[in-house]
Image (cartoon, helix red, strand yellow):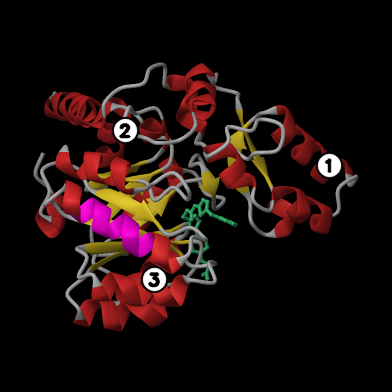
Amino acid sequence: MKTEITELLGCEYPIIQGGMAWVAEHTLASAVSNAGGIGLIAGGNAPIDYLREQIHLCKEKTNKPFGVNIMLMSPNADDLAQLVIDEKLALVTTGAGNPGKYIPAWKDAGIKVIPVVPSVALAKRMEKAGADAVIAEGTESGGHIGENTTMCLVPQVVDAVNIPVIAAGGIADGRGMAASFMLGAKGVQIGTRFLASEECQIHPVFKELVVKAKDTDSVVTGRYTGHPCRNVKTKFAKKLAMGEKDGTLSPEEFEALTVGALKRAVVDGDVESGSFLCGAIAGMINDIRPCADIIREINDEAEKLLKI
Ligand code: TUI
């Protein structure tokens, strides 16, 4: 499917992989890019030397464009903002903040800039600051989330800006992609579906949680810390949610329990103390497939539906 996003990024399909912290490393990113989408390496809170290595490994595995997602709350965000310039990457996406101060340098370096926005106000600010597109991410997404839903946010952002809008949050099949296009999006960002891909390097326990999840198996924790995150509803996530609700966990105690919890989920598959970030659409995902099959199937189904 050709859209303003495939034109902008030079890819075959208007499908961008989510920049999932600890999850989105070079194997997944290169598989998505080689399949004609846009793969991303997630910065998360990772050290800069690790990220440089991931970028180099990804370049070895694909000649197609790929990008980096910068989590702006990371202490390494400044260094990563410079690294994407030094490495002459095709695009950068950002999350969890306003990347305005970096945009002029990225534009000067010819990098396409696509911030994730949870609101119309930030989308407008990003357009003014020179962003090439925005990702309007609904609260159905996994990980750190805003309040508005994909269904409400996407058309409002589409109406508010003149740059292309990519929809994110709750999209895992061709119906979701077609619906996003009907709302005015020119591309989709997909995260959770790629957790259950063959190339995704997360612990098998994490993949199993995604595949087995039902519609009601995600929960948002951490609203009272200012960093709400959607996770698989494990016993640990329920304990956090309950402690937050009934006041038995102070925000400080909550933070102490969740330090390092993403790594414990992704690397160790530790259901007792890991945070398995995942979107509300996990209930629809029932198998582990190669990225190329996932991308082709989603695109073809959407194309078929949009032609009706
Ligand atoms: O960033 C994400 N999802 C993430 S990041 C992450 S790692 C993490 N580690 C520790 C604490 C929190 C997260 C896990 N999942 N998605 C993109 C996203 N960006 N969602 C919401 C936002 C956002 C929120 C506020 C973007 C901008 C924003 O701006 C506030 C402002 O400054 O105007």
Query: Magenta segment, principal secondary structure?
Result: helix
- For mark 2, give the secondary structure: loop
Residue at image location 23% in from the left, 45% down from the top:
30
Q: Earlier in the sequence, mark 3 or mark 2?
A: 3
Residue at image location 33% in from the left, 64% down from the top:
52
Evaluate whether residue 12 shows in this view. Answer: yes
- Vertical arrangement, residue 305 with respect to residue 250, above or below: above
Evaluate whether residue 184 shows in this view. Answer: no
Q: Residue lying furthest right in this view?
A: 248
What's under tag 1, amino acid-wise?
Gly
Q: List the residue tagged with mark 1.
A: 243
Q: List the residue tagged with mark 3.
A: 80
Q: Earlier in the sequence, mark 1 or mark 2?
A: 2
Q: Is residue 225 magenta?
A: no
Position of residue 283 in the picture relative to residue 186 (left or right): right
Residue 288, horizontal then vertical, whole percent: 36, 21
- Vertical arrangement, residue 41 with respect to residue 212, above or below: below
User: Would you identify the image quadrant in which residue 286 lies?
Assistant: top left
The N terminus lies in quadrant: top left
The span shown in magenta is 51-59
- For mark 1, give the secondary structure: helix
Tell me the CA gap for discs 1 and 2. 36 Å
Q: List the residue tagged with mark 2.
A: 199
Residue 282, horizontal then vertical, whole percent: 48, 27
What's under tag 2, amino acid-wise?
Glu
Mark 1 and mark 2 residues within 8 Å of each other at the beta carbon? no
Question: Assess mark 1: CB under 8 A from ligand 1?
Answer: no
What's under tag 3, amino acid-wise?
Leu
User: Would you identify the image quadrant in which residue 284 lies?
Assistant: top left
Q: Which mark is residue 44?
A: none
Tell me the CA gap for discs 3 and 1. 35 Å
- Vertical arrangement, residue 253 with respect to residue 206, above or below: below
